[in-house]
Image: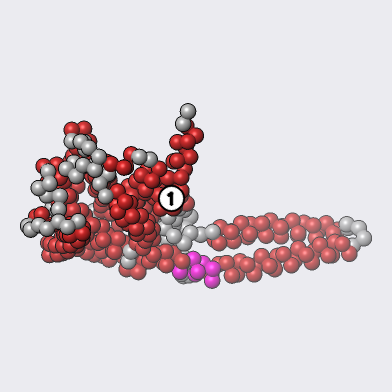
Amino acid sequence: MSEINRHLDEPLQSESLNEIDIISYRWLNVSIRYLPWALFAYAIINYLFFPPQQSLDKTRLDALHWTGFVAAGLVIIVFGIVFKKASSVLNMLWLGGVFPVREKIKVESLSLRIERMANHPVWNVMITIAFLGFTAFFTFQSCSSEGVSATGLDMFFCNYHVSPVRTSKSIVELVTIFFLTLFIWRLMVVAWNIGKLGKALDLTIKWNHPDESGGLSLIGILSFWIAAIFVIGATYLGGWLIVCPSSNFCSSFVKLDSRLETFWINLMGVIILSFISFFWPLWSTHVAMRDEKERFYEEILSPMGQKIDRISNLLVGNANKLVAQNNLGSDGQELLETSDELEKQLEFLKRAYKVVDDLPEWPFNKQTVLTLLSSQGVPLLGLTGIGSNLLEMIKKFLKP
C-alpha cells in the first residue's frame, strides 16, 4: 500500500474524547467570566464620575487609562475564547478523522499533558511570582525616574496614596496582572503543545476537505485567536498613536511625550509578537503537510507529468501526420478520433495536476489570513504615522 493511501482502511472515529480542562480552578473560571465586565465597569465609573478636574491632573485617570482597562477586559475575553477552543480542538480533529485510530492513546496523552501543565500548582505559583516580579521591577524603575521615593506597596505602584482614585488604579492593576499571569501561562502551554502537534502525532491530512486546509483549519482558527490577544494590545497602542499627534485631545494627558515614545516601541514589538503567535503553533503541522505534499509529488505528480508530456508529443505527431496527408481519408478520420480522445485525457490530467499542485501546506485558509492582516490596519497606521496624517487630512476636509 502506498504512503498516500495508507489511511484508507482506517476505521472511522465515532467515540468522542474528553475535552481538555485548561482551567480546573473554579475561582479562576469565575474570574475569566466576570473580571472583564468589572474592568469595563471600573473604566466607565471613572469616566463618568471621576474625570480629570484640570489639565495634567495627576490625581485622576485620563482617557489613556480608561481605554487601557477596556483593552485589558477585551484581552481577557479573548483568553476565554482561546481556552474554550483549545479545550475541544483535539476532540474535534479526532472526530474529523485527522488522527488515525491507532493514535488514540497519544492524543489522550497529549490532552492530559496540556491539562496537567496548565493547572500544576507549582508552575502556576512560579509563573505568577516571575511576572509580578518583572512588573514590580519595571514599575519601580518608572517611579524612580520621576524621583519618587517610597516603601512597601508605594515602591511597586507609585500612584499609591496620591489620591483615592489612583490608589484604586494600583489595586485594580495588581489584581488584573495577577490573573493575566495565570492566563498567559495557560496560553503558553496551549501554544507550545499545539506547536508540537505535527511531530508528536501522525496526521491524516484530508486534502479534499472543504475547509481548504486539509481538515486542519481548527488549528489555524485557534492560532488566529491567540494572535488576537496581541492584536487588541496593538490596536490600543496604534489607536492612540493615530489620535494624539493629530489633535489637542491628548494635551491634558500626564507625561504624554514619554508615553507616546513608549507606545511606539511597544507597538512594534506587539505587532511582531502577533505574527509569531500565529505562525509558531502552526509550524510543525505545516512541516507535516509539506512533507505529505512532497510525497504526492513523488508518487503522483512526477508520473502524471511524464504522461502529460507523452500525450502532448503524440498530439503533435498526429498533427504532423494530418498536415502531411493530402486528404482526410479513413486514416485521417482515425487520427482525428484518436486525437480527440488524447485531448480529453490531456485536459483531465492537467486539471488533476493542478489540483494536486494547489494542495495546501498550511492549516489555515485565505479567509483566516485576510482577517489577520486586516486586523493589523490600525496598528500599522499608528506605527508608520500614516494614520495621524490621514486623520489630519480628514479634519481639514470636514472643516467648514
**Mark 1: which amino acid?**
Gly
Give the residue furthest to the top.
400
Q: Nearer the viewer, residue 12 or 312?
A: 312
Q: Is residue 222 above or below residue 125?
A: above
Where is residue 78 shown, x and y percent of the image?
A: 28, 48
| Residue 54 rendering spot, x and y as whole percentages | 22, 37
Image point (89%, 64%), residue name: 324
| Picture mark count | 1
Report the residue marked by disc 1.
385
Q: Nearer the viewer, residue 281 or 19?
A: 281
The residue under the point 49% across, 66% down is 293
Q: How is the image coloured?
A: secondary structure
Q: Residue at x 18, y 35 (%)?
A: 50
Left or right, 252 with reference to 338: left
Local SS, label 1: loop
Q: Is residue 324 visible?
A: yes
- What segment is highlighted magenta in the picture? 291-298
Residue with the most extreme left position: 152
Q: Looking at the picture, how far across and down is residue 318, in whole percent?
A: 80, 64
How packed mark 1 is, by other alpha carbons closer than 10 Å (few <14, some 14-19, many 20 or more), is some
Residue 102 magenta-drawn? no
Compared to 164, does 221 lie above or below? below
Q: Main secondary structure of the magenta part?
A: helix
Towards the viewer: 160 or 322: 160
Depth check: give the residue in front, 31 or 196: 31
Q: Is residue 10 visible?
A: no
Residue drawn at point x = 79 percent, y = 57 percent? 336
Q: Position of residue 330 (x, y in %)?
A: 86, 58
